[in-house]
Every structure is written in C-alpha cells, then in structure tokens.
C-alpha cells in the first residue's frame, strides 16, 4: 500500500468522472495548493487508507459521477479516517441543492478557486455552495417524529 502520510490534499476521482486531472490541479493551484502535494485516489483506495486527521479530501462531481454509490461509501470512509470531505462540482455542472455526500459528511462548493480555498482551510462558516455558486442553508436540526 502506498504511503499517504505526507499528503496535504487528496482527490477522490470516480472512474466515470469526466473532469480531467490537469483541470483539477489547475483549480487547486489557483486556490494556492502546490500540485506536488496532491494525491489522486479511487473510491476503493480511500477506504483502504489509514488515519488522515484533518486532510482535505476533495470529491469532484460531474453529471456522470454525481450519483455513483461508490462515492457515498468513499465519503463515509473519508470521514471515518478523519478527513475533511469537500464536494466540488465540475465547471458548468449546475447542481442545485445540497448533495447527499456534502449533507452527510462535509461541505460543497462550485468550480471556483476562492470558495474552494476557504473550504480547504476548514472554514465552512459561510455554508455550502451549489454548482452555480449560490449559497445554501443546511436543514435545521429538529426532533424526529416517530
């Protein structure tokens, strides 16, 4: 197994996702991340990774990969190993609302360097952002009616 202990940022890329690795690295560079510290993984690989406390784990989503069940499992694993889950919608992918991965395991933002930089830094005080760049509110906590 590879050593991911020096990773500063992990990108979990599903096989059906059509977002090019170079485009992802370009966006991350615009957000101030050195491409040399980015590690690309598959959903299976993230589930086999040991503890990564506080490491940002980005899930790029496009129309093709948006509903992949393996990504939900991978996001659960990412959260369990201490990663900071961030869903990033591909350029021009107008996802509306809060994606289930972001709702359950982390946050989300559009394909834009500034909001992504803030999410990577761990600041989600502004809340999640949909695929068009609009701010979203998380559903409030409340009593469950049985």
Image (cartoon, rainbow, N blue to C red):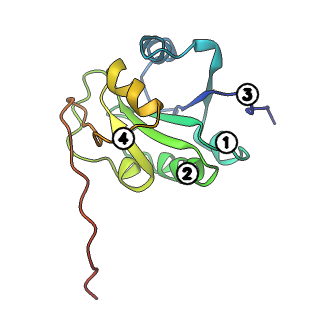
Q: Position of residue 41 (x, y in %)?
A: 62, 32
Q: Residue at x 57, y 13 (%)?
A: 34
Farthest residue to the bottom: give it: 146
User: On the rendered structure, is 19 left or right of 46?
Assistant: left
Q: Position of residue 112 (x, y in %)?
A: 32, 21
46 above or below 110? below
Q: Position of residue 56 (x, y in %)?
A: 54, 35
How far apart, in angstroms, are the residues tagged by discs 4 and 3?
24 Å
Find disc 2 in the rendering and name its residue.
Answer: 79
Find disc 3 in the rendering and name its residue.
Answer: 6
* Secondary structure of the residue carrying numbered label 1: loop
Q: Earlier in the sequence, mark 2 or mark 1?
A: 1
Find disc 4 in the rendering and name its residue.
Answer: 124
* Front tag of 4 and 3: 4
How far apart, in angstroms, are the residues tagged by discs 3 and 2?
18 Å
Q: Is residue 110 visible?
A: yes
């Amino acid at each position: 197994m590879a050593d991911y202990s020096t990773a500063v940022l992990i990108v979990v890329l599903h096989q059906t996702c059509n977002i090019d690795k170079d485009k992802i690295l370009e966006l991350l560079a615009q957000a101030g991340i050195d491409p040399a510290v980015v590690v690309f993984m598959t959903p299976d690989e993230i589930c086999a990774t040991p503890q990564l406390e506080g490491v940002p784990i980005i899930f790029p989503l496009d129309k093709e990969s948006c509903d992949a069940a393996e990504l939900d499992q991978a996001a659960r694993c990412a959260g369990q190993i201490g990663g900071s889950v961030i869903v990033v919608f591909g350029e021009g992918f107008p996802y509306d609302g809060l994606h289930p991965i972001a709702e359950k395991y982390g946050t989300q933002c559009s394909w834009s360097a500034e909001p992504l930089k803030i999410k990577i830094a761990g600041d989600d005080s502004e809340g999640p952002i949909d695929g068009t760049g609009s701010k979203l509110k998380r559903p409030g906590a409340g009593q469950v009616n049985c």
